[in-house]
Image (cartoon, grey):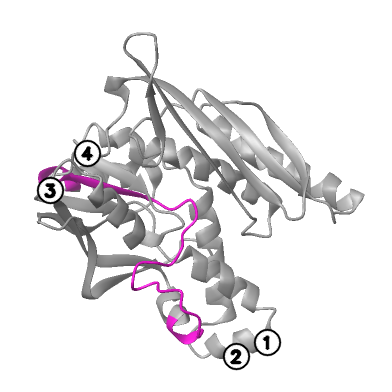
Amino acid sequence: MDSALIPLSIPGLNLIQTTDFFYPLVDDPFMQGRIAAANVLSDLYAMGTTKCDNLLMLLGIPKKFSEKQRDVVVPLVIKGFKDAADEAGSQVTGGQTVINPWFLVGGVATAVCHKEEFVMPDKAQAGDVLILTKPLGTQIAVNAHQWLEEPDRWQKIKDVVTEEEVECAYQEAMFNMASLNKNAASLMKKFNSHAATDVTGFGILGHANNLATHQSQKLKFVIDRLPIIAKMTDTAKACGIKFQLLQGYSAETSGGLLIAMPAADADGFLREFEQLSGNSAWIIGSVESTTEPGAVITDGPQIIEVKTKIH
């Protein structure tokens, strides 16, 4: 699943560890650093732990960077990464920096936990509901923002979205990606979560399917609602590129947690999550018994247009 879980030789202790890295998505180096840290931490949070005892940073510096570009961009990326680490209550103790053809940024996150401090990701049950804690559509928003400077691309979408709406969607996506999933993780045990994963590069359906097929019982995850950043549904349809947003395969970066929990606990989770984070989470589906484990999106899922709070 999302993290390695290794029982240690010290009785009762377990090592939870993960690594991830990717290319820049946004034009703000500080925010890119935060997104990289939030993304790697999210794998720990998907295990229901809020601990991170150590973070390492992985950085690839483009060989084509000028000295001035390097001296401006790199410290800001590092500052953003450390800022998210500080918010997580962790610390960056080292890492690795290399010269690379392309910019790369990521990290390694490690937690040492007792079994009471994390949630195994394989205990979903028929009758559970599926909760998502961040909206979808980040890939579309980031691309649409780039298309503002590409006339041929912009011509394809300008009839369904304004420049201001694209900018708002981009800012929403950037701040969502830079937000930690720690609040959601802190509530998983309280509200009896049975399994979780974070939604990233394989899209909501790809990660739901992976989670469903790793359950101890034969279960089907049925998704019938898709919360999507405002205007990105129409943008995805108009752009001429097969992002497969409504099919559930559009990539996300540092997306929300997808959590299976008892239906009776869901409303309490949603209320407390909004109180802690100031953001919404949504019930997007249900868990059913089956003979063929996996995940599906129903025909014609309800689209929840998530309007940005950023102006």
**x, y percent for residue 306:** 38, 66
- At 24% from the left and 73% from the top, the residue drawn is 301
What amino acid is at disc 1?
Pro
Q: Which mark is residue 155?
A: 2
Give the spatial CA distance, label 3 vs label 2.
45 Å
**x, y percent for residue 97:** 74, 37
Q: Which mark is residue 263?
A: 3
What amino acid is at disc 4?
Ser
Span colored in magenta = 237-266
User: Which quadrant, please, contains the N terminus?
Assistant: top left
Badge 2 marks a residue whose secondary structure is helix
Q: Single out the residue that lies furthest toward the front.
A: 292
Whichever of labels 3 and 1 marks the residue nearer the N terminus, that label is 1
Q: Single out the residue that lies furthest toward the top.
A: 10
Q: Which mark is residue 193?
A: 4
Badge 1 marks a residue whose secondary structure is helix
Residue 108 found in image quarter? top right
Whichever of labels 3 and 2 marks the residue nearer the N terminus, that label is 2
Task: Name the residue beneath numbered marker 1.
Answer: 151
What amino acid is at disc 3?
Ala
Whichever of labels 4 and 1 marks the residue nearer the N terminus, that label is 1
Badge 4 marks a residue whose secondary structure is loop
What amino acid is at disc 2?
Gln
Q: Tags 3 and 1 in contact by the CB under 8 Å rule?
A: no
Q: Can residue 3 be seen?
A: yes
Q: Tags 1 and 2 in contact by the CB under 8 Å rule?
A: yes
Give the spatial CA distance, label 4 vs label 3.
10 Å
Q: Tags 4 and 1 in contact by the CB under 8 Å rule?
A: no
For label 2, the crowd category at 10 Å Cα-Cα, with few meaning under 14, some 14 to 19 and many 20 or more, is: few
